[in-house]
Structure formats: structure tokens, C-alpha cells
């Protein structure tokens, strides 16, 4: 199951880097850059992933465990102000009918989460949020888990892959948002199976050259395995590329809605994958859908943080006492 999750995260990470007739291309790229510079506002994400597993030959217990991963629904809402280093994010997850929610708080240097199943606020080590390292003397640039050079090259690779004719300016329309009716223009990108495979494979080659990323992943694996790590970054990228070649991508599209101020206020990413030949942990394929909405852009935000006390907080070392069995299984698979 670990390989499935790593594969999903890799695909989601790469497709989410979407940073095309001439004016349409330039307008879209300008909106991407402007949206990436937003410092305060609110955002929601609605994620749906449906898995197709090959159940043949599995025991009842194995089928039961897989059923929790057959469908994943997640709703996320966040209010943020990067200048003040404040944010409140509310999350709801549903794994195959098993649902739970969680609220994340960041108030300056203090970060903590509230999960009803725990009954208390869980205090987070600030460094865990960045690179899972505990050396607080490392500067902000060193804490980044991936180099700026890699991020830039991945963005350039996306633009090189997309032909200018692949972006279409749809007719102007009006969209309902939490702020009311907003005038928007729709841009659509559709990639062929061949284009997307080429993008992912070449992106894997770029990641392979990033020593900072290698070091970060190796350090993280050592921490969760208490000093031991048999993780091989080169092999992971190689397996990822092989998996891409043995997969078939269908219905891959990206839609962006840009408002009159030049911000992307809504994005929809969706695609489906079918695995050929070698399967990932018995998975035939999956369908992916992500919708992102943004509003209150660059407006002052209101934050209400709970008062923390010794009685209503717990240390991160105590979290195992409240993890649902489904995550205990995941933890076991990582060891």
C-alpha cells in the first residue's frame, strides 16, 4: 500500500505544478504567476479518488482492508495570512465510509491540530512541518525539502510540454463564489496519454538530480524507522518511470477560471489511470478529481485561536494512543 500512496502523491504533485493561441497562453501564465504570489485569503479543496483493485485470490481480511482505500473523499478549507504567519485549516476525510475531521492551526511559531478522535490539541514540532528535521539553527533556505532550481525546471518542463494551441479561452461567464457573483474566463488544457507520460518521465529525471530532495527523504525515512533506512532514491524514480510506461492515462484535463483581477479563482484537475502489465499492489487503476476554489484574496482575515492549556494539549509522542486502526495498519506497512 505504501507504493500506491507514493505513486499517487507523485502524480498529484507533478500535475499540480500546472503553472497556452498566443494571447490566451500568455494570459494564463500571467494568472498562474499572480496567483502563486497570494499572501492572504481563503481556499477550499474537494478531492475524490476512486480505486479499482483486483480482488481475485485475496482473503476476506485483505479485501476488508482494501475496501477502506477503494474510495477517498477529502474536503479542505483554509484561512491564511502568510505575512502574519497565521492559518486555520479544517479538513474532513472519508476512507471507504470511515470518516473523521481535523483542524490545523498555525499562530506565529506555534502549530497544533485538533482531532475529535484524540479529544485534545496535538502540539506539532515546528520543524516537522518543513523537512522533519529538528535542527532549528538551519536557515529557511536550508529547510526547504526541494531546491528552487528543481521547482523552476519542473515549471519550465510543464510549459515546454504544453503547446500554445492546447489552451483555449472559453466564453466569459459568471461564477458563484462565497463573495457573490464573479465574472470569469475559462481556460482548458487537455493532454494526450503520450504528452503526459513524457512530462512525468522527464520530471522524474529532474527530481533525480536534486540532492536536497534526496537528503530530505533519506532523513525522513531514518526518523520514522529510528535510524535505519534502506530507501534508494534512484530506484524509486526508476520504478516510478517504469510504472508510467506501463500505465494508460485517460480523460486528463485541467480547467482554470480566471477573474477580472487576473487571479485563478477555481481550478479543476481530473484524469483516470489504468495499469498495464505490472500492477501496483494489485490495483487496476484509479480515477482522480480535484477542485480548488479561492476567495477573499488579499483581504484582511479573521482568526480565532483556542486557548491552550496543560490539560487540553498532548505531545506528538502520544499520538499513537489515538490513531484509528486504519492508520496503525499504514504505519506498520512503513516499517
Image (cartoon, helix red, strand yellow):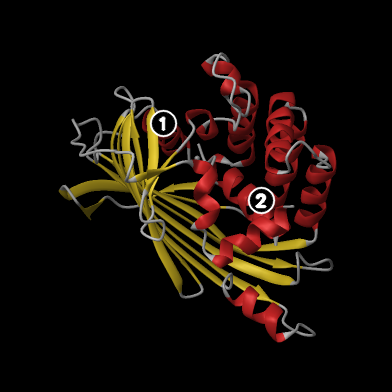
Residue 326: image x %, image y %? 57, 66
Image: 295 above or below 253: above
Is 232 on the left-hand or right-hand side of 134? Answer: right
Residue 89: image x %, image y %? 34, 45
In the image, 331 versus 186, the foreground residue is 331
Query: Which residue is situated farthest in the front direction here?
Result: 311
Q: Earlier in the sequence, mark 1 or mark 2?
A: 1
What whole-number distance in Å separates the C-alpha atoms at marks 1 and 2? 23 Å
Disc 1: CA contacts within 10 A as few (<14), some (14-19) or many (>=20): few
Residue 133: image x %, image y %? 61, 28
Residue beneath the point at 59% across and 42% down: 162
Quarter of the image that includes the N terminus: bottom right
Query: Which residue is situated farthest in the left direction here?
Result: 180
Image: 197 above or below 83: below
Is 113 on the left-hand or right-hand side of 246? Answer: left
Residue 195: image x %, image y %? 68, 49
Residue beneath the point at 41% across and 31% down: 36
Q: In terms of secondary structure, where does tag 1 sit?
A: helix
In the image, 86 versus 109, the foreground residue is 109
Q: Would you identify the image quadrant in which residue 35 lies?
A: top left
Proximity of marks 1 and 2: CB atoms separated by less than 8 Å: no
Q: Circle 1 is placed at which residue position?
A: 36
Residue beneath the point at 54% across and 40% down: 17
Q: In terms of secondary structure, where does tag 2 sit?
A: helix
Q: Circle 2 is placed at which residue position?
A: 196
Amino acid at each position: 500500500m505504501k507504493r500506491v500512496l507514493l505513486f499517487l502523491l507523485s502524480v498529484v504533485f507533478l500535475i499540480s505544478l500546472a503553472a497556452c493561441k498566443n494571447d490566451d497562453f500568455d494570459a494564463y501564465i500571467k494568472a498562474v504567476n499572480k496567483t502563486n504570489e497570494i499572501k492572504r485569503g481563503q481556499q477550499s479543496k474537494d478531492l475524490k479518488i476512486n480505486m479499482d483493485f483486483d480482488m481475485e485470490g485475496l482473503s476476506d481480511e485483505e479485501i476488508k482492508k482494501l475496501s477502506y482505500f477503494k474510495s477517498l473523499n477529502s474536503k479542505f478549507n483554509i484561512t491564511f495570512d502568510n505575512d502574519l504567519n497565521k492559518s486555520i485549516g479544517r479538513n474532513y476525510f472519508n476512507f471507504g465510509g470511515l470518516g473523521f475531521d481535523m483542524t490545523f492551526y498555525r499562530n506565529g511559531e506555534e502549530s497544533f491540530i485538533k482531532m475529535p478522535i484524540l479529544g485534545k490539541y496535538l502540539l506539532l514540532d515546528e520543524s516537522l512541518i518543513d523537512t522533519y528535521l529538528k535542527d532549528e539553527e538551519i536557515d529557511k533556505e536550508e529547510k526547504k525539502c526541494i531546491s528552487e532550481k528543481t521547482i523552476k525546471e519542473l515549471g519550465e518542463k510543464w510549459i515546454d510540454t504544453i503547446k500554445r494551441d492546447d489552451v483555449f479561452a472559453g466564453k466569459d461567464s459568471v461564477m458563484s463564489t462565497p463573495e457573490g457573483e464573479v465574472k470569469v474566463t475559462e481556460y482548458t488544457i487537455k493532454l494526450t496519454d503520450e504528452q503526459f507520460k513524457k512530462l512525468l518521465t522527464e520530471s522524474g529525471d529532474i527530481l533525480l538530480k536534486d540532492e536536497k530532495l534526496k537528503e530530505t527523504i533519506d532523513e525522513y525515512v531514518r526518523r520514522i524507522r529510528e535510524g535505519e533506512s534502506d530507501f534508494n532514491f534512484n530506484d524509486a524514480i526508476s520504478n516510478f518511470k517504469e510504472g508510467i510506461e506501463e500505465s494508460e492515462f485517460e480523460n486528463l484535463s485541467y480547467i482554470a477560471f480566471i477573474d477580472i483581477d487576473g487571479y485563478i479563482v477555481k481550478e479543476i484537475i481530473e484524469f483516470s489511470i489504468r495499469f498495464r502489465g505490472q500492477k501496483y499492489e494489485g490495483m487496476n487503476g484509479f480515477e482522480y478529481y480535484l477542485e480548488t476554489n479561492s476567495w477573499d484574496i488579499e483581504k484582511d482575515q479573521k482568526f480565532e485561536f483556542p486557548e491552550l492549556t496543560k490539560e487540553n494539549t498532548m505531545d506528538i509522542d502520544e499520538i499513537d494512543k489515538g490513531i484509528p486502526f486504519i492508520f496503525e495498519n499504514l504505519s506498520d506497512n512503513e516499517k
